[in-house]
Image: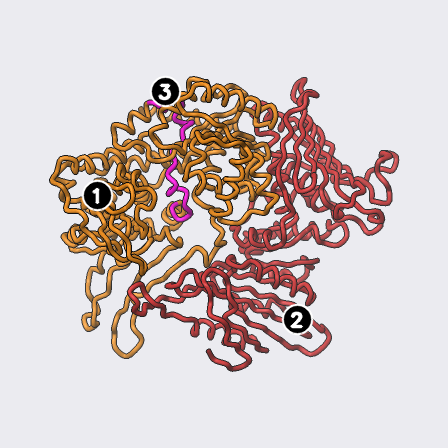
Chain colours: A red, B orange
Amino acid sequence: MDAARGTTALAEATIGGPVLRWSSRTRTIAGIEAELARIWTSAPLTTTGADGAPERHVAARTSVMNLVVIARRPEIAEHASAVIRNLAGRHPSRTLVVSSADPDGPSWLDAHIQAHCVLPRPDAAETCAELIELTAGGESGRHVGAIVAPLLIHDLPVTLWWPGDPPLASPQALDLLAMSDRLVVDGSAWSGDGLDRLAALAAIVADRNLGDGHLAVSDFAMLRQSRWREAIASSFDRPELRPYLGGITRITVRYAAHPGAGVSGTNVIKPLYHVAWLASRLGMSVVEPLRPTKPGHMSGAEHPDIGAPVDGVLRAGRRRVPTHLVPVESTMPPGTTLAVELTATRGPGSLDVAVTAEAEAVMVRSSLGGRALPVRRFMAPRRTEVELLAETVESVGRDPVAIAALVMAAELAATG
Amino acid sequence: MRELRLERTGKRRRAAQTERNPLREGLRLERVPDPHVVVLFGATGDLSHRKVFPALAQLWRTNLLPQDWMLVAVGRRPYTDETFRVEIGRSLAEFNRVPLDREIERQFLDRIVYHRGDFADDGAYDRLAERLDGMDREHGTTGNRLFYLATQSSAFPLIVGQLGRTGLDHEVHGGGWRRIVIEKPFGRDLDSARRLNREVGKVFRESQVYRIDHYLGKETVRNLMVFRFGNGIFEPLWNRRYVDHVQITMAESIGVEERGSFYEETGATRDVVQNHLLQLLTLVAMEPPATFEADALRDEKVKVLRAIPEPTRADAARNVVRGQYGPGWVAAQQVRGYREEPEVDPISETESFVAARFQIDDWRWSGVPFYLRAGKRLPKRATEIAIQFKDVPHRLFRDAAVDPEPNVLAIRIQPDEGILLRFGSKVPGLGLDIRTVTMDFTYGSAFSVDSPDAYETLLLDAMLGDASLFTREDEVEAAWAIATPIVDSWLDGPAPEFPNYAAGTWGPEAAETLIERDGRRWRRI
């Protein structure tokens, strides 16, 4: 292997697990391109065939996607790189982790290029995934789009993962989104109540100029709730209970808040997504967006220090459906959903469903006309970022259910 | 007829609409089955230990089983719940795909109870029925039952009859579903398969019956449909105009191991050709189904089987080759011949290898031979489907040292699943030499290497009531209608000259002749 410019000769690949096969540094975009080409010309192409004779395989560059991570701080970049390395056999084809530093200094670029290879079986060629960790200093750090564009594998989907608080409405973000097919965020990690960014995200989803008009969006906050949605949906699986979906009269979501949150605000993206998902699935529309409860209406249980509940009204057909997001003092991380409660009527009958979090499970308790139905329990362990990112990189296309929920969430939270 | 069909379609649409739960839309991967009890007959057997329990444990680990879930293991051996759990714990340690966390394993094992009883004993079923009712009350399993027959096939009619006698098959309104999973072999010829279908049909409706062929649960097999019908570029080529022939190989390097007495009664044709190989053939050859619903898919598969002419005695003699391995060397180890294996007759005529040439008489495939081969003690373990395309119509590169080889698209099913395409490429240099190169796609390199085992996929499907990957009554019978005349033709013919291939080789010489006669050769795998 060529030893120029800090290239390191690395271990032979073992079967199954990814091995670091290439590591080099460079300081220009052209340098990065040259290094990437060298990885592909030096990967072993000839392997031993079944009869012992050398057999030529085309190097299997299993091209699935580009993953671009925008990390505004070095610690976010380090964390993201660690998550990506842990994806192991699920590597996208090329990952760029871009962070910027020293915005007022002169322009510079520092890139660390790595190839992680997997040997699927002894007689096959290795398949490699590239990881480029880039730091851009000075002015160039403000033009990330110009750094990313030449480094993407062409004709492959681009997933843009933006951890932390992305400036979604900024020109820099729009530049990057214009070349992306999927945006990945974690709404529950946004600062404050998260609603400003939610509005920006909904605007991006509605923007037909992005992602060729099909920009897909994945929010870890919504992905984490999949088992909750399964639990809620299951309570209406029985044919005799299904009609009650058309008669929902009240939706209440309780979420964890810590004392002092009244001032800084608790991130309410997760509880809001629950209401938005239900409303969008059931074809409801927003009559009154969510607003803080008037002080006179506040019940004694809620402590003003943890923030006020918010109330809104949805409409299903001709029926008004009061909706509440209620903070509850809890040791759980702020913004965690504690309970989703639904009340529904149909003729003289009434159905109450309470879905609550208990340790690593979600419990569904329902009662029909006051008579308790069997309790169901769904395991819902908290999923790690590695698992969520793995699910994200493997998902394809725009998920209409997620998009509808996102748009509804923004309408419910409308500040106008 | 047309009106009838329209009416039926209309009915199905309406039914689907009333059943729809709008909250289910978009919840694709997370579906957890309703609470239920699995009643596993033959729970102490090899299949249960190697496949069924590990698959269930993985489903439990990944939270895909409902929390209100129980398993009743039915067997004849004297175990208590506790001793049986210890036994299963041991099997899990040995056969699990991903090791279980100790606590998760404990939770899983706690949901298994042992029910001792002879399959013929009325009392055992009466007690079972009582026990299941008790479970509904205690564990909230709401009357849903999945019966799983992992016993010797001879016990199937007995168990099914007893389930009928005790009314355990009845789906009571609001009282839950009843389904039965039946393992292979489903009959040993056309007559016995029909008899068994009739016995099962006396008790269960066809929609309650899930005949398992684990090959259909494998990722690559499922991907075959995506590959064919989800890509625009292959389907136009997938016909007699471009395809020269198709080869389906299922090679095993192992011998009969501990299954000598079973294999003596079965042989390669019954063991793998009638089910796995013909299933693969139907998936390669079928027309695009109208929808991805279980019956639409199975209708198309049955059509393929019916388009294969039932072999006459002369066809069998000409187009089928059987073999049996003698002593030899496999993977640097000396191994004994079939007739020296434990529990095998020293003058056995059971075939451990079979190669066959089939034709499919329909518009798409007329004139395209399908070559199938399967055997034990072959040089390596490999299962693949290879589509060989026709030669280029005109030889343009006259000066090249060799002519370009025809393109091959190979779908590898095991050991590691993937797809491979061979095509000609110019050798670098001033001359114009053509060399065949391989473009090799391995699943593990593009996606998670953590694919579920076939049994995990199939068990979950049965629990969710999706029968797409299970074999329907008419499908089983149509496959036997092809395999039965072949095995029957051997019954009164002259004794075969067995053994006729050495362990560690690719089968008897006659298998080569079978394909070389058509001017083709087996792929070197």
Q: Amino acid at mark 1?
A: Pro
User: How far is the residue under mark 2 from the one under mark 3?
Assistant: 74 Å
User: How far is the residue under mark 2 from the one under mark 1?
Assistant: 79 Å
Q: Which contiguous range is marked in magenta?
A: B199-221
Task: Look at the numbered disc 1 and give the secondary structure of its residue.
Answer: loop
Q: Which mark is residue B346?
A: 1
Residue A75, picture quadrant: bottom right
Nearer to the camera, B308 or B216: B216
**Chain name for mark 3:** B
Q: Amino acid at mark 2?
A: Gly
- Residue at point 36% right, 32% down? B152
Q: Which mark is residue B202?
A: 3
A17 relative position to B156: left or right: right
Q: Which mark is residue A217?
A: none
Mark 3: few, some, or many residues within 10 Å (few <14, many ≥20)? Answer: few
Q: In the image, is residue B366 above or below residue A163?
A: above
Mark nearest the camera among 2 and 3 is 3
Residue B494's x, y, as percent?
11, 40
- Residue at point 79% right, 41% down? A327
A339 relative position to A281: left or right: right
**Chain name for mark 2:** A
Q: Amino acid at mark 3?
A: Lys
Taking the image as drawn, is residue A153 in sight?
Answer: no
Q: Which mark is residue A141?
A: 2
Q: In the image, is residue B279 above or below residue A47?
A: above
A192 relative position to A141: left or right: right
User: Are discs 2 and 1 both within one chain?
Assistant: no
Mark nearest the camera among 2 and 1 is 1
Residue A215's x, y, as percent?
57, 53
- Residue at point 19% right, 55% down? B520
Count of residue discs:
3
